Image (tube, helix red, strand yellow):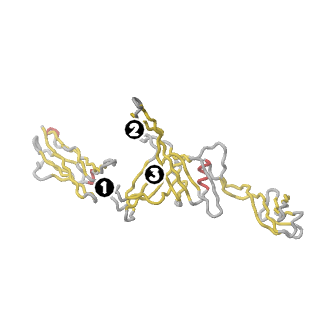
Amino acid sequence: MANNEFLVSVANVVLRDPTTLEGLAYGKANISSAFSISMQKTEVRGGINNPLVYSYYHDRMVEINIEQAIFTETVVALNAGATIQSAAVTVLKTECLVLSASGSGTCTETPTGNVSVFLPSGTIEFVTPTGSDFTTSGGADLRVDVVYPYSKASDRITVDAFTPPSVVDLTLLAEVRDNTGAVTYYLQVHVPRFQVSGNYTMTLSANGVSTQALEGTALVSAATDCSGSDYYATVTWIPSAATTIAINAIAATPGTMEFTEASLPSNQTITTLGIRGGLYTNLNITTSCSYAMAAGGSAAFSVGANTGVVTAGSSGSAGHAATVDVTYYDPTSGSLVDTVDVSIIA
């Protein structure tokens, strides 16, 4: 990455089912998002004055914390390890009514239980309604507050005592920009198995809006092949449409290619790697290079212009030799060149 590139603003978050990868939520109104890696350390000391001879690092953890400006039932459900049920449920109704001269009133909804009537004097009458109607003993012509249960089709989450918080597939999506403001990379942090912490706080204030946090820890995912290891997360830099991954050198292998005279005609393939340096792994750019036979070599050899396949024809014999010029163009580094020497042996 260049020195003038910056990870900007806040990440969006995508939550999916870890098994089916079906989308569960897409958060685009986040206030903050954090991705952290931590480890514990055990010190090994010994000898005079007990010097430190080795540090053993263990118990790696990957944690993610997201704070949202919006309020959604999904975050509550994930922390409770529950699904969002939709059904006719008993809920509470509060409303203001002006009672008649006889102290009677009519509820907007049909109560499924008794009605609590809060009189201006501070007295509370608990009365049994008839349908939606009720009558108080001391509320004639008064403005009162009433509270009662009724049935309403609603979404509901049950926070039970035993279910652990949910495990989801989580991806953070952020932008990397340079000092001109242009997007150079899209950063994706993918956690295949993210266990929500189960810690949830709903804080309400008189002069603001509630925010809610989604925090948790990555669980280990099994390696997909024998060459890899179990892992917590992958962090991917996706080049923007205008960005080419910088390569500062190329390596064409093998550097020397030999053909046996008895096996002619035959083919061998050059593999070309793009070297970016630092902690970046090499890239296989074989089919992105151009290949040509250098002047002065034996005419017994030919090479595919963009394949790297070298052919030693039947007209060749021991002692024939040539050089293949391998060229790759990188927008940052310009034309990069390497060579492969080819020969025929007895």
User: Disc 2 marks which residue?
Assistant: 226
Q: Camera-side residue: 177 or 14?
A: 177
Tell me residue 277's x, y (percent). 30, 49
Tell me the tag on residue 260.
none
Whole-Å distance between the Cαs marked 3 and 1? 22 Å
Image height of 75 relative to 164, above or below: below
Q: Is residue 291 left or right of residue 319?
A: right
Name the residue tied to disc 1. 246
Q: CA distance from mark 1 to mark 2?
A: 30 Å
The kind of residue tagged 3 is Val
Mark 2: secondary structure: loop
Left or right of 208 on screen, residue 186 = left
Relative side of 326 to 204, left or right: left
> Which residue is the site of mark 3?
189
Find residue 8 and report its horizontal and vertical position in percent. 44, 59
User: Residue 135: horizontal and vertical position, in percent?
Assistant: 87, 63
